[in-house]
């Protein structure tokens, strides 16, 4: 059987390393800062070696030299755009530096490259957490460009639903504010003729510009928020009243200058909250100039739940989740599902909250350790592997068994035994090992 050439053998070993089976030579954790001087020497000797560069960058991050880590990894990805280790560790470095949008893009790229394993599972949960941070980052960036965005025409048929503050005296009704906003977002998404912005995106903007402060509704501020978001229309309102009579006061506001708001409010007993929500959704469609097909109208009128306690628990879950209290949010969503097992919106939110809670419990250092186990090549292994390649280059000078004639060698007409003088050569594989 002919021995594989050095390149093929090296590729096989690399595949083994990539699957996490490099045995004693794999790095069980990220490199320590103590390795930095040696790694810098090796990187200077082999600047194109992405493995060495990635391990050096990981060591920089361990030493709190995050900017140097980012610079080195960005340079590495220029020539090795799909190097899993560089992609992953640059994502970690960006996150540590507070560049959440950049971290999110790198994490998503890594998930495109890596198909399985504990690291992928952990990162998938992390993406949900970082996505929220990136969303708030994008809101702040939009506010910084407010003057520019105000002069930019909004995207046609784009609508944003702002949170509904509760102005009444019964604190038990307060959670309906965010629940109502999410229900409207769901109902307004039942046709492709409206582009409905994500509730959380709008919520973050509302918090940043102090929209819908207690006791007042400011259409001018709502229109300003809509222009920052690039929305053609915004829905803004408030909830008032008690269990005996609840008031849903809302308006559809065009973000263009001097546009009049169209009222879509109503009032009734709290027990009819779900009817009032559906009436409001249909009125918003009418104000937006969208005539629903019978199929679309049927979808809009489908009720996620008719259990008032369940929708209040759902609203409490949204409040907790928006504030970053993910485990508390999961508990509220679980209660909503227990009250109404058919409440799919709450079940989906419960699953998301659990994932966010799990991601929040895992710090960046834990992710760095997971990455080290899967992605980083230890220096001891790199040295051993290089010795194997050097040996194979010498070994390749000797014919393999399939290139030799055993009979001719036996009778002494060719091969190493042809001469009467016997020269015994013993080759020891450098570095030991397999």
Image (spheres, rainbow, N blue to C red):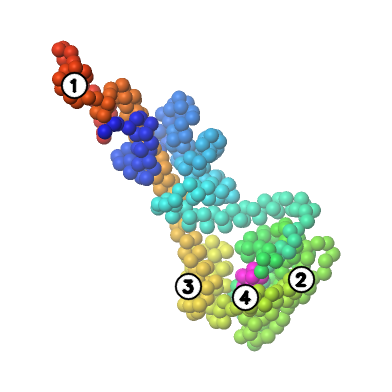
Q: Which residue is mark 2?
A: 289
Mark 2 Cα shell of 10 Å, populated few (<14), some (14-19), many (≥20): few
Q: Earlier in the sequence, mark 1 or mark 2?
A: 2
Q: Is residue 255 left or right of residue 177?
A: right
Q: Which mark is residue 299?
A: 4
* SS under mark 1: helix
Residue 106 at x, y percent in the picture: 54, 46
Q: Is residue 248 magenta?
A: no
Is residue 277 at all visible to an observer of this figure? Answer: no
Q: CA distance from mark 3 to mark 2?
A: 38 Å
Is there a contact, CB below 8 Å, between mark 1 and mark 2?
A: no
User: For mark 4, does the 10 Å Cα neighbourhood hold few (<14), some (14 to 19), or many (20 or more) residues?
Assistant: some
Residue extent of the magenta highlight: 182-190
Q: Which mark is residue 333?
A: none
Mark positioned earlier in the residue sequence (3 or 2): 2
Residue drawn at 34 percent across, 28 percent down: 389
Q: Nearer the viewer, mark 3 or mark 2?
A: 2
Visible in this render: residue 359? yes
Disc 1 marks which residue? 409
Residue at (48, 66) in percent of width and height: 351
- Mark 3 — residue? 334
**SS of the residue at dot 3?**
helix
Q: Residue at x 70, y 74 (%)?
A: 292
Q: In the figure, 380 relative to 412: above or below?
A: below
Give the residue at the far right of this rendering. Answer: 258
Disc 1 from disc 2: Cα separation: 93 Å
Quadrant for the C terminus, please: top left
């Amino acid at each position: 059987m002919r021995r594989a050439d050095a390149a093929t053998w090296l590729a096989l070993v690399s595949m083994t390393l990539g699957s996490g089976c490099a045995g004693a030579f794999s790095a069980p954790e990220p490199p320590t800062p103590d390795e930095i001087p040696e790694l810098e020497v090796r990187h200077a000797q082999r600047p194109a070696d992405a493995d060495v560069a990635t391990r050096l960058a990981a060591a920089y991050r361990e030493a709190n030299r995050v900017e140097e880590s980012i610079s080195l990894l960005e340079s590495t990805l220029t020539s090795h755009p799909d190097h899993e280790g560089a992609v992953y560790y640059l994502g970690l470095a960006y996150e540590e530096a507070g560049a959440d949008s950049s971290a999110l893009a790198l994490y998503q790229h890594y998930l495109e490259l890596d198909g399985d394993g504990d690291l992928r599972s952990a990162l998938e949960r992390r993406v949900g957490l970082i996505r929220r941070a990136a969303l708030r980052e994008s809101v702040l960036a939009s506010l910084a460009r407010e003057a520019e965005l105000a002069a930019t025409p909004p995207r046609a048929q784009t609508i944003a639903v702002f949170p509904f503050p509760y102005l009444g005296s019964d604190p038990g009704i307060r959670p309906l504010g965010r629940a109502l906003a999410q229900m409207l977002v769901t109902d307004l998404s039942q046709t492709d003729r409206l582009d409905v912005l994500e509730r959380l995106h709008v919520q973050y903007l509302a918090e940043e510009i102090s929209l819908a402060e207690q006791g007042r509704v400011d259409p001018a501020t709502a229109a300003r928020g809509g222009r920052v978001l690039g929305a053609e229309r915004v829905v803004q309102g408030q909830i008032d009243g008690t269990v005996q009579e609840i008031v849903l006061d809302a308006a559809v506001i065009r973000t263009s200058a001097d546009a009049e708001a169209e009222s879509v409010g109503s009032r009734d007993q709290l027990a009819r909250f779900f009817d009032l929500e559906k009436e409001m959704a249909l009125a918003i469609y009418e104000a937006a100039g969208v005539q629903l097909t019978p199929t679309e109208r049927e979808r809009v009128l489908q009720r996620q739940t008719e259990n008032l306690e369940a929708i209040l628990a759902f609203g409490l879950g949204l409040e907790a989740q928006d504030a970053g209290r993910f485990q508390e949010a999961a508990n509220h969503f679980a209660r909503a599902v227990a009250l109404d097992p058919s409440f799919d919106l709450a079940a989906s939110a419960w699953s998301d909250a659990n994932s966010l809670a799990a991601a929040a419990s895992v710090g960046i250092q834990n992710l760095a350790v997971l990455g080290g186990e899967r992605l980083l090549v230890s220096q001891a292994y790199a040295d051993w592997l290089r010795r194997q390649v050097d040996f194979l280059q010498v070994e390749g000078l000797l014919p393999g068994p399939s290139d030799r004639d055993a009979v001719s060698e036996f009778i002494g007409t060719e091969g190493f035994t042809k001469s009467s003088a016997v020269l015994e050569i013993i080759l020891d594989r450098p570095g030991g090992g397999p």
